[in-house]
Image (cartoon, coloured by chain):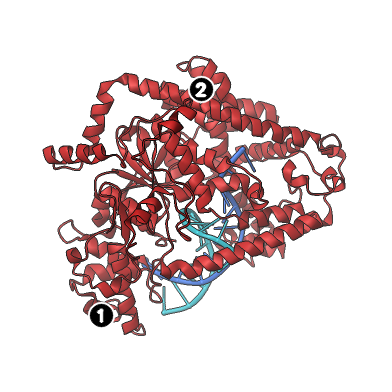
Chain colours: A red, B blue, C cyan
Amino acid sequence: MGITGLIPFLEKASAKMHLKDLSGSTVAVDTYCWLHKGVFSCADKLARGEDTDLYVQYCLKYVLMLLSYNIKPILVFDGQHLPAKALTEQRRRESRQQSKKRAMELLRLGRTDEARSQMRRCVDVTHEMALRLIQECRMRHIDCIVAPYEADAQMAWLNKAGIAQYIVTEDSDLTLFGAQKIIFKLDLNGAGLLVEAEKFHLAMGCTKERYRFDKFRRMCILSGCDYLDSLPGIGLAKACKFMLKTEQDDMRIALKKIPQYLNMRNLEVDDAYIENFMKAEATFKHMYIYNPLERRMERLSALEDHETEEGHCSNAGSLLADSEKALHLALGNLNPFTLKSLDNWHPDKATDSKTTSAKHIKRTKHKSIWQAQFNNAQEVELATQPRPTTCALFFKKVDFVGQTIQSEIEANQRQEQAKHTEAELFSLYSFKGKRKRSPSRSSSNSTPPPSPVQSKSRHNPFARETTQLPSAVCENASLLRLVSPLRSAEEPVRPETKRVNALKRSIFAEEQPQVEVRSRFFSAQTPEPHPEPKVVAEKKTQQELELESTTSAAAVNDANNNNHNDDDIVLLASSGSDEDTSSQSATLPSSQEAALPAKPQLKLATSARRVGLSKPKTKKKTKSASLGDNQTKLSAFGFQKRSVLK
DNA sequence: CTCTACCACTCCG
DNA sequence: ATAGGGGTAGAG
């Protein structure tokens, strides 16, 4: 999905950002990204048709985080599949079905590990799941909107219309639809990468005067996008080069000059490609979106604005004649594929019945895009101030009414979070309870080596070698329930895994100082490498190690945390670590000590990631030494493991 | 040198 | 046969 390599290409147009700097603004969210990630937490349950709302809770975590920074979220969902994509979707569905069958089969055979991996592949984000999240959001007065087609176009429109100043997504396509400020890689700490359309000329390496957005979009399409594969040998770099060389605005003429301009003699640009290029461009410009203020479907931009021929819009969707249906589709009441009615919520029939039925759930005080006043407020603001920043002003006004609102929101959140935590804890406890019930734990240390089934069970032969890790067995009690007690008796225990991980950490601690952190984002996120605790950790037991990292994390915490957001930290902690929350909300929010337990976890998480990054490297170094010289030094950094395994 | 093809890994608790 | 980002080798 999206444009391959676009995000690194846009490095010069991007900057690290944090939500705390967006207070008072509105953010449109590509909710599918969150749902999809959230599904991992309960893939097995979903695969077996068990009822779960873990994925909803996962998304709400993000939503609450946005609210905690005084940001109004608008959750945007995908609608119908475009005809051009229907086929691939169909294929995906079939492959998921197959995965499901295979998972069941494997379960029956008792190969839980493989079954688990299959189950992850077979879950889909259905509209019913999206609707559950939508319903949760309605109770909290959080805006949701289902795009007629792609959420990308809808979000770009919200951005262009000034309703949302930022967009949160993982899909680089957003840039092509004309979104101005896009946040990628947003994490639960509130950090992300901001890409701004107004800086695209920097990435393309041309002056602002010579740059036009069309050039950028055409470059991306040329490099290969969802609607059109690239010509062979053309990627972003070549496409960029070409778009800077030509001043020809008519692509029918310009495209023919590609071989000549790029010195690619054998390249052939046929008429079909040109026609498809025009269609792809039209799709990005004119896809249908839903205008919630006018309550009607519209094109992202009007055909006249671009002198586009109607015929090129065959992939841009079609107008839904029934405006009532279009509205309910946008509200989420209809299944976008079948148009079957699943709910009957309406913004005008202010659902006080619902609010009384759920009065313990706190609601946001943001103006809804579905309210008539929203339109007025926008118009007034737009009239007084032509700049798009007016929206920020508008919300600042709300902010003005009280810091009290802010603190109230925070109080609400603590309360709400506590409630969620309750539910989540519940599931956690039952989870753990089941796990304990499984007879494995006591016998684990004397467990015989993994059965042949297990060692064969890695579905990817190139995956990291884990034969010495006993973790290759299902830890999920609900999954285990399906298999024989005999098999579950073989389950090695988690403490074991933990110890191995701790060991890995300590091993890694030695290597740390030598390892270069490559990732720009990552290194930027941890500005202080803190070599000292790692050196100390070298020869410690895992408990000491854990203590060590805790204190070092505390130090980092202190250092990073110059003046402000004690509150932020508490909020983060409460949204980040579920188990701590209840006790924290009981204690005073301002005490920093209360927040500390959560931070080390985060720190550990990042260091775990580093382990993943660099452990292979260190392994390779040692191995290449033993391998001799039939491998070049360069290849020693490549996929060495493969040959070793062979 | 630039671009593509390919691999392993992480998404979640 | 998830998808998408990151890294490397190898082709033009």
Q: Is residue A70 left or right of residue A473?
A: left
SS at badge 1: helix
Q: Which mark is residue A354?
A: none
Residue A310, quarter of the rendered image = bottom left
Residue A19 visible in the snapshot: yes
Q: Which residue is mark 1?
A: A257
- Residue for point 63% across, 63% down: A97
Residue A443, quarter of the rendered image = top right
Q: Nearer the viewer, mark 2 or mark 1?
A: 2
Amino acid of disc 1? Lys
Q: Which residue is mark 2?
A: A595
Q: Is residue A625 left or right of residue A240?
A: right
Crowdedness near tag 2: few (<14), some (14–19) or many (≥20) residues, C-alpha within 10 Å: many
Quadrant of the rendering where the N terminus of chain A is positioned: bottom left
| Chain name for mark 1 | A
Q: Is residue A306 left or right of residue A72?
A: left
Q: Is residue A47 above or below residue A17?
A: below
Crowdedness near tag 1: few (<14), some (14–19) or many (≥20) residues, C-alpha within 10 Å: some
**Whole-percent x, y for residue A196 in the image:** 29, 49
Q: Is residue A160 left or right of residue A626?
A: left
**Whole-percent x, y for residue A555 in the image:** 50, 24
SS at badge 2: helix
Instruction: Name which of mark 2 and mark 1 comes first in the sequence.
Output: 1
Q: Is residue A116 above or below residue C9?
A: above
- Spatial separation of the CA atoms under disc 2 and disc 1: 61 Å
Amino acid of disc 2? Ala
